[in-house]
Image (cartoon, helix red, strand yellow):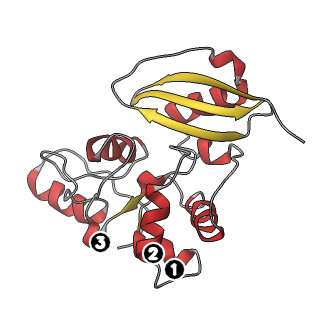
């Protein structure tokens, strides 16, 4: 049984989010396009529009509750399913993600699964960080967008220019507290 796919672009704080979904709202593909403010036919996908508005308004797990269609190898789909269980406001390393997916020695493969993710924001690969609390890269706009997404979800990022080596979470909170009089938001994750 085939399903008709529809697409729409949604304006977000972080750029345009292009979504391809079935009429029932199951997301088949999504791409965050930083720097673009396109918004075309969001009424075609009302469930996704509602979830995106809730996410923008602070319900940081709203997008992981949207049904998705995962297409990939059995290991990749297991990693993506597992990634959808990482709560907003928390981050995991590639090694932790591999262990959560039942393959503790497959951290590089978990990283490859993140790099092959075609469901930006709905499968939140921005919640995966590099070793030793470093931010790491992000295929949907680079480390600056990744840092902004994590901050939106309540994760502390070290002050200064954002790079792949910027510290995240508790490590950032310690650095930030030592250099800034501002209150520090800490993630609920354990380091």
| Gap between marks 2 and 1 measured at Cα | 5 Å
Along the horizontal axis of the image, is 41 left or right of 46? left
Q: Image check: 68 left or right of 135? A: right
Task: Determine the residue positioned at 54% across, 36% down.
Answer: 55
Would you say the residues marked 3 and 2 are in contact, meaning their CB atoms lie under 8 Å apart?
no
Q: Which mark is residue 131?
A: 3
Q: Residue at x 60, y 61 (%)?
A: 85
| Quadrant in the picture for residue 176 | bottom left
Quarter of the picture containing the N terminus is top right
Q: Residues within 10 Å of mark 2 (few under 14, many from 20)?
A: many
Q: Do the CB atoms of the residues marked 2 and 1 lie less than 8 Å apart?
A: yes
Q: Which of the two labelled residues, at mark 3 and mark 1, occupies the earlier sequence position?
A: 1
Q: Secondary structure at mark 1?
A: helix
- CA gap, disc 3 to disc 1? 14 Å
Mark 3 Cα shell of 10 Å, populated few (<14), some (14-19), many (≥20): some
**Disc nearer the start of the sequence (3/2):** 2
Give coordinates of residue 145: x percent, y percent.
32, 40
Foreground residue among 66 and 190: 66
- Direction from residue 183 to residue 4 in the image, left or right: right
Residue linked to disc 2: 96
Image location (x, y in percent) of residue 88: 50, 52
Name the one closer to the observer, 139 or 136.
139
Q: Is residue 53 above or below residue 70?
A: above
Q: Could you say whether the residue bearing mark 3 is in a helix, strand or loop?
A: helix
Mark 1, Cα crowd under 10 Å, few <14 / some 14-19 / many 20+, is: some
The residue pinned by badge 1 equals 99
Vertical placement of residue 26 versus 159, above or below: above
């Amino acid at each position: 049984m085939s399903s008709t796919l529809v697409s729409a672009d949604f304006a977000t704080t972080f750029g345009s989010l292009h979504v391809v979904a079935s009429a029932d709202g199951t997301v088949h593909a999504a791409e965050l396009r930083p720097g673009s403010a396109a918004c075309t036919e969001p009424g075609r996908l009302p469930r996704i529009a509602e979830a995106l508005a809730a996410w923008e308004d602070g319900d940081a797990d709203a997008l992981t509750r949207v049904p998705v269609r995962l297409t990939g190898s059995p290991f990749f789909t297991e990693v993506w399913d597992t990634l959808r269980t990482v709560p907003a406001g928390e981050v995991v390393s590639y090694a932790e993600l591999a262990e959560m997916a039942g393959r503790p020695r497959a951290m590089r493969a978990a990283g490859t699964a993140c790099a092959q993710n075609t469901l930006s924001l709905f499968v939140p690969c921005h919640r995966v960080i590099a070793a030793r609390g470093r931010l790491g890269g992000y295929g949907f706009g680079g480390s600056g967008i990744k840092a902004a997404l994590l901050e939106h979800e309540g994760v502390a990022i070290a002050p200064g220019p954002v790079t792949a080596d910027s510290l995240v979470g508790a490590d950032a909170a310690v650095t930030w507290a030592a250099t800034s009089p501002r209150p520090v938001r800490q993630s609920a994750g354990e380091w």
